[in-house]
Image (cartoon, grey):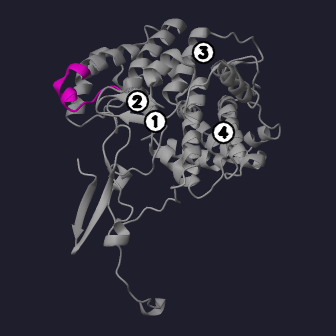
Amino acid sequence: MSNTATVSIDGKTVEMPVLRGVDGPPVIDIRKLYAEADVFTYDPGFTSTASCESKITFIDGDKGVLLHRGYPIEQLAEQSSFLEVCYLLLHGELPNAAEFEEFDHNITYHTMLHEQFDRFFNGFRRDAHPMAIMVGAVGALSAFYHDSTNVDDPAQRMISSHRLIAKMPTIAARAFKYFRGQPFVHPRNDLSYAENFLRMCFSVPAEDWKPNPVLTKAMDRIFILHADHEQNASTSTVRLAGSSGANPFACIAAGIACLWGPSHGGANEEALNMLAEIGSVERIPEYVQGVKDRRYRLMGFGHRVYKNYDPRAKVMQQTCHEVLAEVGHQDDPLLKVAMELEKVALSDPYFVERKLYPNVDFYSGITLRALGFPAEMFTVLFALARTVGWISQWKEMIEDPLQKIGRPRQIYTGAPPRDYVPVETR
């Protein structure tokens, strides 16, 4: 394959280098196109544009592959832990025993929030959506931890990374408790990351909270499955905000705001609503026909990137069964609808030809509901897990010498130049 691509326009010919990564399609480097040919490229949604070089996550949507630093997501979800995956994403390699012990200690002992920070929650209305609280609370972290906002200091970058990973479960649990009208629960240093979070969410003063290894493992696995997903909308938002030199807390708050959109982080809630709308296995044929007739939308199937089975969906399906069996909801009617709908979609030529395979959101909504979370918390949990991916991408962006402040171009289709006319003569 040629190492250059040629563009000819208006009598000008520009040769552009073709770059190749470790995997994935070749990339045409168009950085000099405007300077040499006085033209831009047009790519709404940036679906054909590589905005950066990254060593963190690789997706092959056609083959259904998701790798974190080269490791398949299936192996990490089955054999690793969320904190180990956090270390991997941040540092590039899996930790040895000593490195993990130090990292685990650093995260565990950063989980407390400044005591004044709790007053911040009282500024929200009692019925505020937990994601609204998350956006405001995470953005406010920079006002409490300004000793780690210098993006040019590697030590401060790492401290802020640890703080965000550590404090996000505490903030998320407080958003949940505030939404529920229950007292806040402080973190405990003798519990694991997932166990601590579940305790902060579901412990109440009236009775003792008892950990459940099956539910703790499920929560940890859900965090792993959502830890990073390459240059999606919220990650690109974090990178774009960070390209201006904004502090990491502000950048992550921007990512949370983007994730809040129903086309991004709210997909699992939409999938759960769809299953509830179907209601019973008997109604599936009618609903499927409605999808074909474009009267209904099929939520939780297909993906912007994956054109094959979402590798995270297989792990989430197993996790869903484990959780439902543990909490006694294995006869959950929504699960029966989900299983039958999956079977129909994987065998019906209409869906097979369009490669509408189940994605991770298809099962995660049911699983989170069985764990005890309301739909309003689904995206909060997504944000909690994705924080490590965002901060790893932000850190990589800051340390990339080729990175510039983001400045997309446009095709201007407005009015041509014209003179101002005084109001009395218009």
Q: Which residue is mark 1?
A: 57
Distance between the Cα atoms at labels 4 and 3? Answer: 24 Å
Expressed as whole percent of the image width and height from the top left, the position of residue 195 reads: 66, 18
Residue 250 lies left or right of residue 318; in this view the side is right
Relative image position of residue 326 (x, y in whole percent): 53, 7
Q: CA distance from mark 1 to mark 2?
A: 7 Å
Q: Quadrant of residue 17?
A: bottom left
Quadrant of the frame with the C terminus: bottom left
The mark nearer the N terminus, 2 or 4, is 2
Helix, strand or loop at label 4? It is: helix
Q: Nearer the viewer, mark 4 or mark 3?
A: 4
List the residue tagged with mark 3: 216
Residue at screen point 78% across, 37% down: 118
Q: Which residue is mark 4?
A: 161
For the point 43% across and 8% down, which residue is it? Answer: 331
Q: Amino acid at mark 2?
A: Leu
Q: Disc count in the image?
A: 4
Q: Position of residue 314 (x, y in %)?
A: 39, 19
Magenta range is 346-358
Is residue 355 located in the magenta-colored stretch of the structure? Answer: yes
Measure the alpha-carbon separation of dots 4 and 1: 18 Å
**Is 38 on the left or on the right of 95, as rendered?**
left
Looking at the image, residue 370 lies above or below residue 418? above
Which residue in the protein does label 2 denote? Answer: 66
Marks 3/1: CA–CA distance = 25 Å
Report if the CB atoms under discs 3 and 1 are less than 8 Å apart: no
Q: Amino acid at mark 4?
A: Ser
In this image, 156 relative to 357: left or right? right
3 or 1: mark nearer the eye: 1
Mark 1 burial class by Cα count in 10 Å: few <14, some 14-19, many 20+: some
Q: Earlier in the sequence, mark 1 or mark 2?
A: 1
